[in-house]
Structures are given as structure tokens and as C-alpha cells.
Amino acid sequence: MSVEDVAQVLEMRAHAPELTAEHVAQRARQASVLGLGAVLCRPEHVRVAAEAVRGSRVEVGTALDFHARGGPLDGLAVLTNQARALVDRGATVIALIATQQRLEVDGGRAFAAALGAVTTAAHHQGASSRAVIDVGRMDLEQEIAAAKLCLDAGASLIQVGVWDGRRANFGHMRQLRRALGPRVLLKWTTPVRSIDVLLLAIAEGMDRFNADVGSLLDEARSRAQWMPMAVPLHGWDYD
């Protein structure tokens, strides 16, 4: 992998509550300069983030239910209109958060219908959808079932673990990729702290990552000067 390849699998987090619109714009501009995969922000900051990355390939992602992720979902018509409005403001990725409470309603069918409606609305306007699975109270079997439900509902990317709760460990992510197959992108919420961990995670089928972007790209640039950043091969380079 080149330094540019590493940058493209990283996402800039710009959704902390203390960030102002100007701070979000600064991070979005940084994401554009570095060539990151996406900048992630709150719904109210979508427009300013989109303006900051205009002309670049950086995606602008937000969670539709960012401020009510623990509560019941709105109706399908409301979710559809909200998704369309966010895409109109510049969002290219619309996420819906899957909590255990939401997945228990009607055996998960209600959440699947909601995610399906969001996916359809996003696709009609050239955007994509993702599901963010809150694994806080789930075991591995429940995580896999939730991920499969989100895959069947049309999510283009599944993110496991939310930013303010328990996150899936590396072993769980390996199992999730094996259960899901190659049809969907998979994001590990736990921030990646070294190039070696990043490369191993990619080898295990993970596609997008959080990180201290500046530090990780500095490490990538340093590494590229003295040895290749090669993704290891399972069964050849490691067991």
C-alpha cells in the first residue's frame, strides 16, 4: 500500500459535541488535503463539511438519528424525508444506528424496513447508506445477526461499535467478515493505532477505519521510506 492508499481507508471524525462549525470545516479541509475516505459529522454540520470538501473525493457522512440514537425510530416517511434533506445539504453517506432495543422491535423487521427506506432514499440521490451497530449489550452471535440483517436491508457499509460505547474487538471483526462475506464494506470503530494493525485488519477483510489521522499517516510516510507497506497474506505470512 502507498501512503495515499492508507489515507483512503481512514475517516476523519468531526462529530464531537464541543466542535463548532468552524472546527468541522477545518477538519473537513484537512481530510480533503490528505485524501481521506470520508469526514463524519453531526447532521447540523453536513452543509459546512460538504462545502469544505467540494471538488475532492472525500465522502461526507452523518447519522440520521445522531441525537436520538437510543430511542424509537421515526416513521418511514419521516426517515425518508430526513435522508433526502441531508443529501440535499451535501451528505453522501447516511447512517442509521442499530441498537439492541431497536432490533428487538418486531424481531428486527421494523429496523430493517427503516434502513431499507433510508437506503432507497439515499440511492435515488446518488448517496449510500451505512448501519452503525451499537454492540454495547450484544454478544458475538447477536452482533452477527444484526450485521446480516443490515446487509439484507441494503447497507453499503456496516460499522461495528459506536463512538461513545463498547467497541467490537479484533476477533469479533474477523468473525463478522467471515459471516458477511465480501458483499459489504466493514468498518472497525476502534481507532487503529499503528500501520501494522491497519495492515493486519485489512488482511482480515476490514475496509474503513478511525485513527489519529495525522500520527498514522506520519508513520505511513516514514515506513514507506524504508520498507513496503504490504498487506500480509493469511496462511502465508500469519496463521
Image: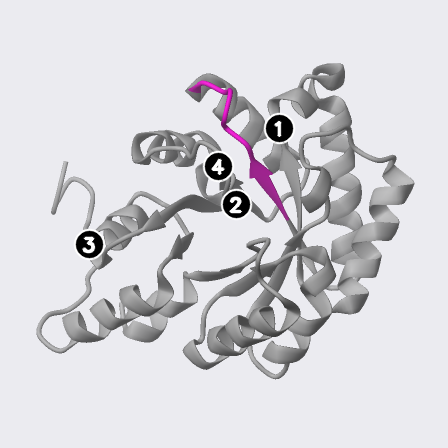
In this rendering, the label closer to the viewer, 2 or 3: 3
- For the residue marked with disc 3, what is the amino acid? Asp
Q: Earlier in the sequence, mark 2 or mark 3?
A: 2
Q: CA distance from mark 2 to mark 4?
A: 16 Å
- For the residue marked with disc 4, what is the amino acid? Gly
For the residue carrying disc 2, how many other residues have a C-alpha within 10 Å: few (<14), some (14-19), or many (20+)?
Answer: some
Q: Which residue is mark 2?
A: 184
Residue 17 in the magenta stretch? The answer is no
Residue for point 68% across, 45% down: 66
Q: Earlier in the sequence, mark 3 or mark 4?
A: 4
Q: Which residue is mark 3?
A: 196
| Mark 4: secondary structure | loop
Q: On residue 161, which mark appears?
A: 4
Asked if one can make out residue 91 in the rendered structure from this viewpoint, the answer is no
Q: CA distance from mark 1 to mark 4?
A: 10 Å
Q: Position of residue 91 (x, y in %)?
A: 70, 63
Quadrant housing the N terminus: bottom left
Compared with 78, 144 (above or below) is: above
Q: Which residue is mark 1?
A: 99
Q: Earlier in the sequence, mark 1 or mark 2?
A: 1
Q: Position of residue 199 (x, y in %)?
A: 25, 54
Q: Which residues are magenta?
A: 130-139
- For the residue marked with disc 1, what is the amino acid? Thr
- When asked about the image quadrant of residue 59, the answer is bottom right
- CB under 8 Å between callouts 3 and 4? no
Q: Nearer the viewer, residue 205 or 102?
A: 102
Q: Earlier in the sequence, mark 2 or mark 4?
A: 4
Compared with 161, 90 (above or below) is: below
Compared with 34, 89 (above or below) is: above
Q: Position of residue 95 (x, y in %)?
A: 65, 47
